Image: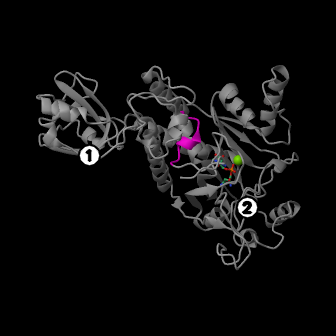
Amino acid sequence: TVKSLYEQLHQPRHDSISVDGWIKSIRLLKRIAFLDLQDGTSVNPLRIVVPLANADYVHFLKNLKTGQTLSISNAIWQDTPSREQPFELQIKDPIESIKIIGPVSENYPLQKKFQTLPFLRSLPTLKYKTSYLSAILRLRSFVELQFMHFFQEIHFTKVSPPILTSNDCEGAGELFQVSTNQLSSPSSYFGKPTYLTVSTQLHLEILALSLSRCWTLSPCFRAERSDTPRHLSEFWMLEVEMCFIDSINELTSFVETTMKTVIQSCLDNQKELLPKQFISLKEDDALSTSLDQERQDIITRWQTLASEKWQTITYTQAIEILKKNYNEVPLFKYEPIWGQPLQTEHEKWLAGEYFKSPVFVTDYPRVCKAFYMKQNSTPDNTVACFDLLVPGMGEIIGGSLREDDYDKLCKEMKERGMNKSGELDWYVSLRKEGSAPHGGFGLGFERFISYLYGNHNIRDAIPFHRTAAGSIN
Ligand code: 4AD
Ligand code: MG
């Protein structure tokens, strides 16, 4: 692969090299041609230099087109320490060494010019051939592995909770229904009302009460109508659940350590993760300036994230800060009111403008949050929970301590009109069989990846996005 060639930089090869990939660009000069090949394994393309020794070679090379698939053989390694690329491959006889193994059409859209993201999103089958968007998928793959290593080291078990469920964990009524209780219906799950999970938390709690510490990275589904850059109908959530914690501070410190560890490993591997010529494609126009600056901005953000202390405030403090600014400078469409959820504009402003840092907002009013959250012992009707807000994105994590008292949990569910036919008995019953203080959180994986990458539309962080806008490939 192209990546393995880059990995051999310090022990250049003397044998003849074969490599396959797609033409990223081709440039014919007077005596030589430069062919940049990419195969999706590396942020850097592979430069191949071809002599234009005779008219046949020129003719052959003129017929090569951006996007074509090539199989190259008999190439020779050449160190080029003075060039931007530290090595290149040289070919003697292109007609011998270059085989076209896949065609492109006349109007192949990914020509060498700047494209906008909306344009690339309209090409779901081609968009990850661009270095900007393939890098986000490799970053995602890398980050998944880093979480895996981290949790493994601190004795968390990776579990696989179900996707088909009968419950609405978040109680927001945003369920995609898979089957109804119509036994005769061909799409029925054995005559039981069944949904795609919105969060695996309830099952994770059960597992944590056996394994102490567990985590998962699972698809979650929400039938939200929100057609925004931060909402998907199908997204992936990294969920963590652990026993024997009894303060929200323990949970937020754990989140901070976990995230910082992962971000530090991104920093340690920045060369591999960020294209050398980082082209930040824009939402609105085709312009991209100062390539190096874009890359440097990301690295600086990672460094700041990994080294500075993240902020923590309570929901009540957040409302006070927002109110003050609402009165003095009417910035917001929505008035901040105690007892109502924070709006996205509030979240973005708190993290992006006010703190300019990730911020944990803790202890929301009970009425704003889900039924399972542990009630605080203070008289203000708040629950022991937190949301992690980040600049440019708003909420990326929601978490809480869980109500582990059987009577309190049942009372709360009753007040919310839940569990009328005992469908959640399996969940509450564990509060009687070796209950323990426990808590956890869920990280929206695409939101985190987009935030790290500095591309604030999470549709680019998942191949084949499913959104409220509908379309499916
Ligand atoms: O805040 P949420 O709804 O929390 C839960 O589901 C808890 N049960 C998690 C837990 O404690 N185990 O969702 C968690 C995160 C959000 O902060 C957000 O990042 C992401 O999931 N998320 C979405 N991401 C993309 N598209 C959507 N429609 C999302 N809805 C939530
Ligand atoms: Mg939430």
The circle on residue 359 is none
Count every numbered label the image shows and give the total: 2
* Residue 257 can be seen in this image: no
| Residue where numbered disc 2 is placed | 168
Reading the image, the residue beneath label 1 is 20
**In the drawing, does residue 303 fall left or right of residue 161?**
left
Looking at the image, residue 415 sits to the left or right of residue 174; the answer is: right
Q: Is mark 1 within 8 Å of ligand 1?
A: no
Residue 166 is situated, as x and y percent measured from the top left of the image, at: 70, 68
Give the quadrant of residue 54.
top left
User: Residue 46 placed where, x, y %?
Assistant: 28, 35
Main secondary structure of the magenta stretch: loop
The front one of 253 and 287 is: 287
In this rendering, the label closer to the viewer, 1 or 2: 1
Mark 2 close to ligand 1, CB under 8 Å: no
Query: Of the residues under marks 1 and 2, which one precedes in the sequence?
Result: 1
Vertical placement of residue 18 versus 401, above or below: above
Residue 65 visible in this rendered orientation of the protein: yes
**Type of the residue with mark 1:** Asp
Tag 2's secondary structure? loop
On screen, 428 above or below 440? below
Determine the secondary structure under disc 1: strand
Magenta stretch: give its range: 454-463
User: Is residue 401 toward the left or the right of residue 274 in the image?
Assistant: right
* Spatial CA span between label 1 and label 2: 48 Å
